[in-house]
Image (cartoon, grey):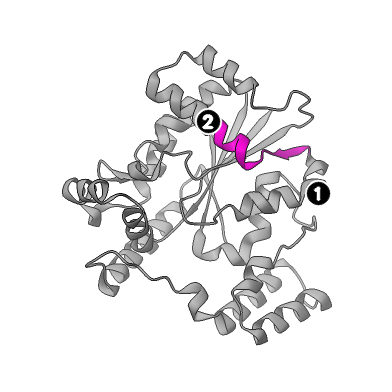
Amino acid sequence: MQVVIHAGAAFTDDGRLLGSLLANKAALAQSRSLPLGPRHSRQFVKVMSDSVIKDVPVDDAQEDLREIFPEDLNAERLIISSDKFFGPRRTALQHGQIYPFAGKRTAYSEKLLEGAQIELFVGLVNPGSFIPKILMSLHEDQRESILGSTDLSCLSWLNMIDDLGDLAPGVKLTLWENEDTPLIWGDIVRAMAGLADDVALKDEYALLLSLLTGTGKTQLLELIQQGTAKDRQSLRDSLAGIFEDHAQPEQIEEELDLPGWNSDIVSAFSELYEQDLAKIRTMPNVRVLHP
């Protein structure tokens, strides 16, 4: 059994990836992949979280999981999606790290899913936008506690990735930049489902279309319908060109409401983010999806 866990990050897809997986169940059946719905995904995370926090014996937690997974499970690849897998949002920025409990929770999931081959999928996002979004989603007392105990300028994804490699070395890790998601949506879905590159998907370009102006939508639809791209790289280059030229600014520009968080701070984090991504792309045991 293979188990794929899509762990977010928070605010990156709003459940759209799981929706796309469920909408393509017929295609997924080709590789005997089965996505769990939102309720069962949440139940899995709850069982895992309660077991970690309350120190529930692994055998008892495994019994609880049997009630979640379908009894007539005719699949070789089970897909779970929850941006709470690494922990609730109030714990996403603690101990000088983004998602400090990611490694521990992933390692414990290996114990719960004994014998399964686990793959972890995470869409990374610029900390310059991720940090204020997390903070503004919390109660004021939680936000003030983090601000008073955490040096935000030191936060990056590298420590989380190092923890995953140290504590759960047997878990295959697939990452991508959330900023690239509209251009590689189909690649992400196929990778999660274990599908071949040429398998057609429903609504593969729906997200990209939603971000474009009228002119951009027309160009994209013509490109897809006419099939003028000579190969996959040519198609990706054309998609990137359309996105760059015809994205609606109000759809891709984010308002960051955290007091004192300004464009200079975002620019500084953007530079560090690019440096971190360059390191991540060279890591031997990490797959990075990109246009």
Q: Is residue 52 left or right of residue 96?
A: right
Q: Horizontal and vertical percent for residue 89? A: 38, 45
Q: Which residues are magenta?
A: 32-43
The residue at the point 45 percent across, 74 percent down is 253
Is 205 in front, or is 141?
A: 141
Disc 2, SS = loop
Q: Are marks 1 and 2 in contact (CB under 8 Å)?
A: no
Q: Amino acid at mark 2?
A: Gly
Q: Is residue 247 above or below residue 157?
A: below
Q: Is residue 10 left or right of residue 37?
A: left
Q: Is residue 291 visible?
A: no
Disc 1, SS = helix
Q: Horizontal and vertical percent for residue 142? A: 26, 46
Name the residue that disc number 1 marks. 27
The residue at the point 33 percent across, 52 percent down is 156
Q: Is residue 64 left or right of residue 267?
A: right
The residue at the point 60 percent across, 23 percent down is 65
The tag on residue 170 is: 2
Q: Is residue 33 above or below residue 196?
A: above
Q: Horizontal and vertical percent for residue 191? A: 66, 49
Residue lying farthest bottom?
Answer: 215
